[in-house]
Image (tube, rainbow, N blue to C red):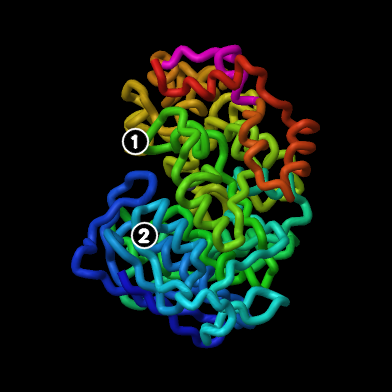
Amino acid sequence: MRVAWTADGGTWRLEFRLDPEDGVTGHCADGAALKLATNTFRVELPRAPRDIHPDLLALTAWTVVAPWTRRRVTFDRPISPGLAGAIGDGWGIEAGPTDSTGNAGTTGTTGTAGPTGPTGTRSRSGSRLAISYSGGADSVAVAAMLPDAPFVHFQRVSHPRVPNRWTHYRSDVLASLAEKTGRELTVVRSDLEFTLAEPRPGYPEHHAVAAGALLMADELDLGGLAFGYELGSRWLGGARYIHRYTPDNLMWAPHGAWGRAFAAVGLHIVLPVGGVSEAVTMRLALGSGLRGQLRWCLRGVGGPCGTCGKCLYKELIQAAVERRPLRTTITAGRPVARKWQQPPPYGGQEMIEYGCARVPGIEDTVFAAAARHLRATEASTAWLDRCYPPAVAEIPEPWRKQVHDFVTGEIGFMSEEEARRVETWGMT
Ligand SMILES: [Zn+2]
């Protein structure tokens, strides 16, 4: 894989070319099979940054091209040995070029690392923590935990070479809601999701959502990026593919491949809600000052659409948190409700158990069959109301105390017995 960036003001455009051993069908870190649609994308920053460290450009590219890279990745400017090592260890991919002179700052590369001036391929660092903010319940919960952290919002825009068959995806609505929060906000627009043809446009790796934060990291002096990935994504194997306790999660563990790659470029992955369930993030989001801007549905304009699978799933959680009957017009025969008529396992199963145990009249809803299969109770799901302690312990030191104090005051930690529910998840 060969990648090359060109810049025009604040717009950065990447072109990548496959090596003979690369393939147009690849796999991302969560196991999904991905088919390539096109070999270019752009990232529009709100202003032209002074300079961007070569490691930040390289890792941004890597979040897109990793699934289709088989043996080596060649960047258009030298990267630090630290980043090359992280890609080598994490993926078994040879990454380069690196600065062969070992004489950082004299190689003629364009990188700088903030106030210290030109550094060539020396590792970068920064000090502030930003939030990768989508506007959904999980990222609103993160915002409630970190009231002073700036937001970086990724907005999908159309790709000049790929027809947009996904016009129902209202990224403009989500961006305008982010603007209404009143928080320090950087909106970054990109068509990088259209590099992905199948199963649909989306982030080739989940981390591609960080493209804007990576490219603006020097400009904003970022040392960490907080994501809204919660207990299910970080520790219970993710919603879709694994469904068991995964302390060594490749995507989100600090010692996983992606965690090490982000650390190598001085932008640490931080998961403030990594130890709590979607019931807790929902409760925090509904109680937050940003409740009016809360939106998990990608389709609605005036409000959530109420008919998509995401709306149905989140309605179950919200109804459980609010201790009220389900409000939905979706019936069991509808395609978005079909999976709940089948026996488990389900994606996000811990939250289906939580909802079925708490929503009054669940036996008369589209979740009736799931509830019969799961037979969950309030007692059997009580662990999902508290925080898994190792999730706070793994937060990088500069931001750990703030999260710890919030969890202590607003959520509470799991007992050892409750933590064992996490650690035996998916085992019979
Ligand atoms: Zn919806």
| The disc label shown at residue 334, or none | 1
Q: How many dots with numbers? A: 2
> Which residue in the structure is indicated by mark 2?
66
Q: Is residue 8 visible?
A: yes
Residue sticking out furthest to the left: 20
Q: Which quadrant holds residue 19?
A: bottom left
* Residues drawn in magenta: 374-385
* Residue 196 percent coordinates (x, y): 33, 61
* Residue 52 percent coordinates (x, y): 57, 76
Q: Secondary structure at mark 2?
A: helix
Q: Is residue 299 visible?
A: no
Residue 306 painted magenta: no
Residue appearing at x 64%, y 23% in the figure: 323
Is 204 displayed left or right of 401 in the figure? left
Front label number (1 vs 2): 2
**The N terminus, quarter of image:** bottom left
Residue 383 painted magenta: yes
Q: Amino acid at mark 2?
A: Ala
- Above or below, 26 against 317 in this view is below
Residue appearing at x 46%, y 40% in the figure: 249
Q: Residues within 10 Å of mark 2 (few under 14, many from 20)?
A: many
- Above or below, 45 against 258 in this view is below
Q: Secondary structure at mark 1?
A: loop
User: Mark 1 or mark 2, which has the lower sequence index?
Assistant: 2
* Residue 222 percent coordinates (x, y): 67, 63
